[in-house]
Structures are given as structure tokens and as C-alpha cells.
Image: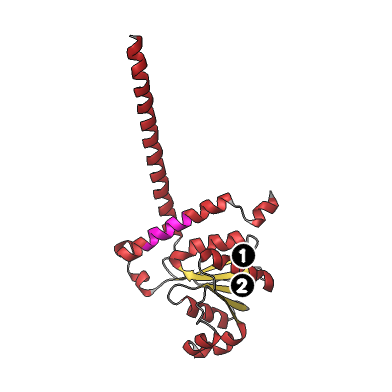
């Protein structure tokens, strides 16, 4: 009798561990699914109408219309200067003026560039630029699906600066839901995964503002 009890104890323990693992995995999947639904709700489906100006404008390169929209904001007086972050080496004032001759005056006087390679680099260079200029508010221009991660990265670097999002939405995104397009759906899922990893990294390394407040 005692031997039978001793043999059944490990099996019972294994069953409990198996159920616990299953419940844990299901909870993680549910949490990620709910997080994805929240993330999708943060991605604007339409371009916004700005209700305020800012000290500066930063455009994160990598998507259609980002630079053109940012220059239009600069020309309309929404900000004092524009930073084009993540620009290719061939991207400079001359090249942009050639593509947008009507905005040449603003491009020549009030546009800066950095050559950062990713969103974290964009945020670090934006911090340097904003602090050098003494800017306390920024309009952030990037694609709509990229906006949550861009805001998170820049806010982490500049916790005391007001960020005003200006999401760029393409004509196709306005008329075709992302879930009906395989490429757009994969892009949304990929962006969500990147966003999750960014938030995990930030949790391990709080911003300078958070460290100073603790």
C-alpha cells in the first residue's frame, strides 16, 4: 500500500505541473491577445487635425509621405524647426528641395538631419536635438502603425517633453482594413511584437526622469 502511494505521488505532482503550465501558457496567450487588441486601438485609422503647435517637429523616416507631411507642418508654422530622423546619406536639404521646390525656403533654413538606423536611435537623436534647441514640445510624424512604438521610445528619452502625434495614414489604409491585407496584417503583428519588447526593455531600464523621481 505504501509503495503504491509513493509511486502515485510523482504522477500527481507531474499532473499538477502540467495543468499549471497549461494554465500559465493560456494566460500568456490571452494577455498577448488582449494586448494586441489594445495596440490596434492605439493605431489611428485617419490622420488627425492638430489642435496645438509645438516648439519642434520630428519626422521618423521609413514610410510614405512622412517627410512631405512634416515639411508642410513646418511651412504652416506648427513648429520652429524640423528634424528628419533616420535620413539616408543621400537625403539632404538639396535633395528635399528638389523634390519639394515650393518648400525650399523652409528646408534651407529650418531642417536638420540625423542618420540613426532604428527607432531607438531616432529617439536618442531626437533627445539630443531637442535638448540642444531647448524644445519642450514636439510634433512626432511617422506612419500610423509605427506611432505607438515611436512615442514610447521618444517619451522614454524625453519624459518631460510634450509629444503631439501626427500619424501618417496612406490612401490605401483609409479604404482597406488592415486585417484584409496579408502584408498589412503581418506588419501590424510585427509592430506589436516590437512594441512589447520595447516596453519590456523599458521596464528593465527606467527613463532618466523616472530614476530621478524615485
Disc 2 element: loop
Q: Position of residue 150 (x, y in %)?
A: 52, 64
Asked if the residue under mark 2 is in contact with the one under mark 1, i.e. CB atoms within 8 Å, the reply is yes
Alpha carbon distance from label 1 to label 2: 8 Å
Vertical order, 49 against 1 (above or below): below
As for residue 52 lying within the magenta part, the answer is no
Please tell me in which quadrant of the rendered image residue 85 appears.
bottom right
Q: Position of residue 94 (x, y in %)?
A: 53, 88
Q: Left or right: 46 with respect to 4?
A: right
Residues 156 and 120: in front is 120
> What residue do we see at 52% from left, 77% from top?
70
Vertical order, 120 against 4 (above or below): below
Q: How many marks?
A: 2
- Magenta region: which residues? 187-196
> Which residue is identified by label 1?
162
> Which residue is identified by label 2?
54
Q: Position of residue 128 (x, y in %)?
A: 64, 69
Nearer the N terminus, badge 1 or badge 2? 2
> What residue do we see at 55% from left, 66% from top?
121
Amino acid at each position: 500500500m505504501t509503495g503504491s502511494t509513493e509511486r502515485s505521488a510523482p504522477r500527481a505532482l507531474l499532473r499538477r505541473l502540467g495543468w499549471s503550465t497549461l494554465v500559465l501558457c493560456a494566460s500568456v496567450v490571452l494577455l498577448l491577445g488582449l494586448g494586441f487588441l489594445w495596440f490596434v486601438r492605439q493605431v489611428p485609422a485617419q490622420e488627425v487635425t492638430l489642435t496645438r503647435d509645438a516648439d519642434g517637429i520630428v519626422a521618423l523616416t521609413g514610410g510614405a509621405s512622412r517627410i512631405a507631411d512634416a515639411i508642410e507642418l513646418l511651412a504652416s508654422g506648427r513648429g520652429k524647426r524640423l528634424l528628419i530622423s533616420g535620413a539616408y546619406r543621400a537625403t539632404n536639404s538639396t535633395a528635399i528641395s528638389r523634390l519639394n521646390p515650393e518648400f525650399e525656403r523652409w528646408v534651407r533654413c529650418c531642417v536638420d538631419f540625423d542618420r540613426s538606423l532604428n527607432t531607438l536611435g531616432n529617439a536618442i537623436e531626437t533627445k539630443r536635438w531637442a535638448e540642444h534647441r531647448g524644445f519642450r514640445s514636439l510634433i512626432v510624424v511617422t506612419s500610423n502603425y509605427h506611432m505607438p512604438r515611436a512615442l514610447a521610445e521618444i517619451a522614454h528619452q524625453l519624459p518631460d517633453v510634450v509629444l503631439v502625434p501626427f500619424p501618417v495614414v496612406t490612401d490605401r489604409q483609409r479604404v482597406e482594413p488592415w486585417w484584409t491585407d496579408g502584408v498589412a496584417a503581418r506588419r501590424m503583428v510585427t509592430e506589436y511584437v516590437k512594441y512589447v519588447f520595447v516596453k519590456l526593455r523599458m521596464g528593465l531600464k527606467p527613463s532618466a526622469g523616472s530614476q530621478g523621481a524615485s
